[in-house]
Image (cartoon, grey):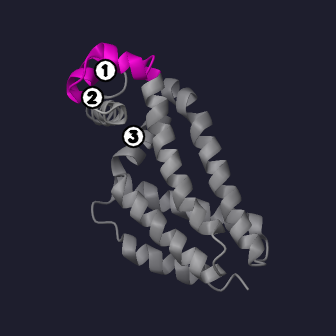
């Protein structure tokens, strides 16, 4: 097995078990068994279960930064906005497990303190990318526009991940684009 393949199998197994059983009820031995690797190999890649949790959050963050790159791609305002919204909703749809787990972690006081700094750092970086897009497009009050867009995206994600089984993501892309498309010059 290639080293990266083994490492990814361990991450996938940890994600699956953290979702199914919860972080506290999952052991490293169970993660190794689910991944089909030895416990020793698991510890070779990750020193602790907490480090596995960091790796899961970091993996999702790296993917989210790729989505955010659409905002500062140099494309015109409406193109950048639409490309970002498409990429964001694709990311939301294809990474439900990662994102659901991260929201659940924020609701558990002891785990919140572990993941909050990483999630805040991710949110700050995405917020700055959004501000950059709005500033480049000479949007009035770009900081407030960025906060509003990020808040709307968070609300949509919450409803999509936890509240509604048939949340209309495609319709939300259209609505958000229509709400923001004329802000830029």
Residue at 34%, 20% in the rendered image:
42
Task: Give SS at disc 3.
Answer: helix
Q: Is residue 28 left or right of residue 175?
A: left
Image coordinates of residue 40 in percent, x first then y, are 32, 13
Tell me the crowding category of disc 1: few under 14, some 14 to 19, or many 20 or more residues within 10 angstroms, Cα based. few
List the residue tagged with mark 3: 101
> Who comes first in sequence, dot 1 or dot 3?
1
How far, Cα to Cα, is label 3 from label 2? Answer: 11 Å
Q: How many marks?
A: 3
Q: Are marks 2 and 1 in contact (CB under 8 Å)?
A: yes
Q: Is residue 36 above or below residue 174?
A: above
Image coordinates of residue 17 in percent, x first then y, are 28, 31
Main secondary structure type of the part rendered in magenta: helix
Residue 157 included in the magenta stretch of the image: no
Quadrant location of the N terminus? Answer: top left
List the residue tagged with mark 2: 21
List the residue tagged with mark 1: 25
Q: Is residue 167 above or below residue 100?
A: below
Residue at 37%, 26% in the rendered image:
23
Q: Which residues are magenta?
A: 26-50
140 or 53, which lies in front? 53
């Amino acid at each position: 097995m290639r080293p990266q393949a083994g490492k990814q199998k361990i991450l996938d197994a940890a994600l699956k078990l953290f979702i199914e059983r919860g972080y506290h009820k999952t052991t490293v031995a169970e993660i190794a068994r689910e991944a089909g690797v030895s416990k020793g190999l698991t510890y070779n890649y990750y020193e602790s279960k907490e480090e596995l949790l960091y790796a899961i959050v970091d993996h999702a963050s790296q993917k989210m930064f790729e989505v955010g790159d659409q905002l500062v791609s140099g494309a015109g305002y409406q193109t950048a906005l639409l490309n970002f919204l498409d990429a964001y909703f694709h990311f939301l749809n294809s990474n439900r497990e990662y994102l659901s787990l991260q929201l659940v972690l924020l609701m558990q006081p002891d785990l919140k303190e572990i993941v909050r700094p990483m999630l805040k750092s991710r949110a700050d970086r995405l917020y700055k990318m959004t501000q950059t897009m709005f500033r480049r497009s000479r949007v009035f009050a770009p900081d407030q526009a960025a906060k509003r867009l990020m808040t709307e995206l968070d609300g949509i994600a919450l409803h999509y991940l936890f509240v509604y089984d048939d949340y209309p993501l495609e319709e939300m892309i259209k609505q958000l684009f229509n709400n923001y498309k004329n802000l830029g010059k």
